[in-house]
Amino acid sequence: MHVLVHGSELSAATAAAALCWVGHEVTWLPHGDQPWSTLRRADWLIREPRLLDQLESGLADASLRLVASAEEALQHPQEVVWLSLSPEQRGDLDELFVALGSNGAQSRLLVNHSTFPVGETERLEARLGQGSHAVALSDMIEEGRAWETFTRPGRWLLGCDDESAEAQVRELLRAFNRRREVIQRMPRRAAELTKLAINGMLATRISYMNEVAGLADSLGVDVEFVRQGMGSDPRIGYEYLYPGCGFGGPNFSRDLMRLADVQFSSGRRSALLEQVLDINEHKKETLFRKLWAHLHGRLEGRCVAIWGAAFKPGTARIDHAPVLTLLRALWAQGVRVRLHDPAALPALREEVGNHPLLELFEGDPLEACRGADALMLVTEWKAYWNPDWRQLATLLAERLVLDGRNIYDPAWVAAQGLTYRGIGRRADP
């Protein structure tokens, strides 16, 4: 098929690479704010396994064509228009639809792979003209494993109200739907709302577990026992039941806000969702409060090491990442920060600039701990899971480890002569 992909999101880059890889002829029109010249140097794209190589391979063999304008894109017939835009770019579609309208009355399939308001796919179809159809295909791509989640999907949520459109989508994605049936069809508005509701439920589980961890901490209970007990109940399960120092990310956070907007615009107020968002923002300061308590509020002039800035392992992004809230709290008390991250340092520099209380480190994570009073684990990169504990104990003046992801064994850390404070877990040397 001839496919036009429009957008500069991770989902757009992944769709362009994957669709041309399986034989479709793909034209890619990045959003004007992020042309290819900018995208190809973006850390989040460089860090995605296989993705940049696949894009460059498609460009080399001409199965992927890059264009800079809608008029240029439509010099060739396009059977499928694939939209992967951010919610803020929804108003930037006029140029594309004008070009589509001036390109004749050919019928097209529009695949809305963007997180737009519920009902937007129907409105997009109305702009296409008679004979064309629009479907909603929920974006389920995971940062850090975008290629894998697109080419070997666990599921596709397809919002579609037309049999012929469904058949065309199935043909478009046939190469990624061969191991088992992964396409679940439902009405378009249902698919748009389902995508938001899924992330709302996952966020609720995380926030509830964080509340339980706080209660466990105050009662002197190790929350790991509670987590395992809850997870063993088949009605609950273990997924997204790990307490931590808050979640972030561009898609997850954005979808929650979009769900809140949907609630508000429908005349409903969700006290539960508001609580989920409030709990998450509160949890982003958890490690700061633990440091405050341990040092009895005497923080000025202190120094802490932080391991991890990315909102999750495997990505170079820091959108809504807990580290941003944590840094602001520490700097407000005059605390110097020595921060290590294997991927997200460029994004952090761009966000906070050259702050006088911040020093960034690459290479050996232990270097960031030299001269620090305490270590804060914020992002659970695999490089942080098994440090040299004996050396770490000699580097930290207060011998304090604050584990924001509960990846360490409290008893083992304490046996190395360190004080351990996790999320609902603790151990003393």
Image (cartoon, helix red, strand yellow):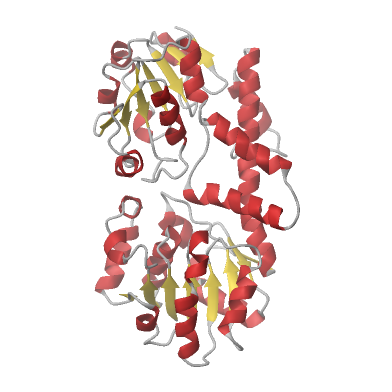
Percent across and percent down for residue 186 are 69, 67
Q: Residue at x 51, y 71 (%)?
A: 173
Q: On the picture, is 364 further left or further right than 9?
A: left
Q: Residue at x 75, y 55 (%)?
A: 267
Q: Nearer the viewer, residue 313 or 226?
A: 313
**278 vs 81: above or below:** above
Q: Residue furthest bottom?
A: 104
- Splitting the image into 4 quarters, where does residue 8 fall? bottom left
Q: On the picture, is 157 further left or further right than 54?
A: right
Residue 421 visible here: no
Percent across and percent down for residue 79 are 48, 83
Quarter that holds the C terminus: top left
- Splitting the image into 4 quarters, where does residue 234 fall? top right
Q: Nearer the viewer, residue 43 or 269?
A: 269
Q: Residue at x 33, y 14 (%)?
A: 396
Percent across and percent down for residue 417 are 39, 8
Q: Residue furthest right?
A: 268
Residue 192 visible here: yes
Q: Residue at x 43, y 60 (%)?
A: 9
Q: On the picture, is 134 further left or further right than 411?
A: right
**86 vs 215: above or below:** below
- Splitting the image into 4 quarters, where does residue 162 fall? bottom right
Report how many numbered discs are placed on residues in the image.
0
Quarter that holds the N terminus: bottom left
Q: On the picture, is 279 further left or further right than 410?
A: right
**47 vs 302: above or below:** below
Percent across and percent down for residue 321 are 45, 39
